[in-house]
């Protein structure tokens, strides 16, 4: 009798998460690298320069954020208002303006008062213009 020796199959070793972070990521990286290697040299240089500038900008942003967070902002105290008592205006004017007795200014004042009374007595509503009757019972 010929018997084939059976080889014990050991279970697949469970790798640590560091060894195998995600299944298939190695193939994706290899695919990207082969695509990058097929590019012309000029395109490779452009991609490398742009990515280097991008990385430098990101590092610069983090450095500036760290530096600005260390800097303490000084609180400037806001001026507080102190309440004052209400003083009513004096009804008597002690030092009137020179235009208070000027004939031209007094004539303008009386003309404005007359105009105001005429406008307040005038009917400004147009009674011939009326809103149309609307039919709200509309069916579609």
Image (cartoon, rainbow, N blue to C red):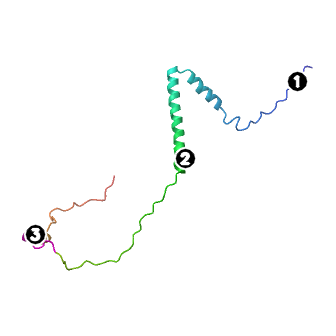
Question: Picture coordinates of residue 103 (x, y %)?
Answer: 7, 71
Q: Is residue 105 above or below residue 75?
A: below
Residue located beneath label 1 in the image: 5
Question: Picture coordinates of residue 68 (x, y %)?
Answer: 51, 48
Residue located beneath label 2 in the image: 66
Front one among 44 and 119 = 44
The earlier-in-sequence mark between 2 and 1 is: 1
Question: Picture coordinates of residue 37 (x, y %)?
Answer: 57, 22
- Tell me the residue at 54%/35% (across/down): 55
Q: Quadrant of the N terminus?
A: top right
Residue located beneath label 3 in the image: 105
Question: Picture coordinates of residue 45 (x, y %)?
Answer: 51, 24
Looking at the rendering, the stretch of residues picked out in magenta corresponds to 96-108
Kindly report the distance in space between the C-alpha atoms of the residues bearing marks 2 and 1: 66 Å
Residue 16 — which label?
A: none
Q: Is residue 41 above or below residue 102?
A: above
Q: In the displayed structure, does residue 11 sit left or right of residue 18?
A: right
Q: Answer yes or no: do the residues labelled 3 and 2 have beta carbons within 8 Å?
A: no
Q: In the displayed structure, does residue 139 sit left or right of residue 74?
A: left
Q: Nearer the viewer, mark 2 or mark 1?
A: 2
Kindly report the distance in space between the C-alpha atoms of the residues bearing marks 3 and 1: 127 Å
Looking at the rendered structure, the secondary structure element under dot 3 is helix
- Tell me the residue at 52%/44% (across/down): 64
Front one among 100 and 120 = 100
Q: Nearer the viewer, mark 3 or mark 1?
A: 3
The earlier-in-sequence mark between 3 and 2 is: 2
């Amino acid at each position: 009798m010929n018997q084939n020796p059976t080889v014990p199959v050991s279970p697949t070793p469970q790798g640590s998460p560091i060894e195998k972070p995600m299944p298939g990521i190695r193939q994706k990286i290899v695919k990207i690298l082969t695509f990058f290697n097929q590019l012309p040299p000029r395109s490779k240089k452009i991609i490398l320069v742009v990515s280097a500038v991008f990385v430098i900008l990101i590092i610069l942003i983090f450095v500036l954020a760290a530096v600005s967070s260390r800097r303490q902002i000084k609180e400037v105290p806001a001026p507080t208002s102190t309440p004052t008592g209400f003083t009513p205006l004096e009804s008597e004017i002690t030092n009137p303006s020179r235009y208070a007795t000027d004939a031209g200014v007094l004539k303008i004042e009386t003309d404005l008062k007359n105009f105001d009374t005429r406008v307040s007595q005038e009917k400004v509503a147009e009674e011939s213009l009326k809103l149309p009757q609307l039919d709200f019972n509309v069916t579609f």
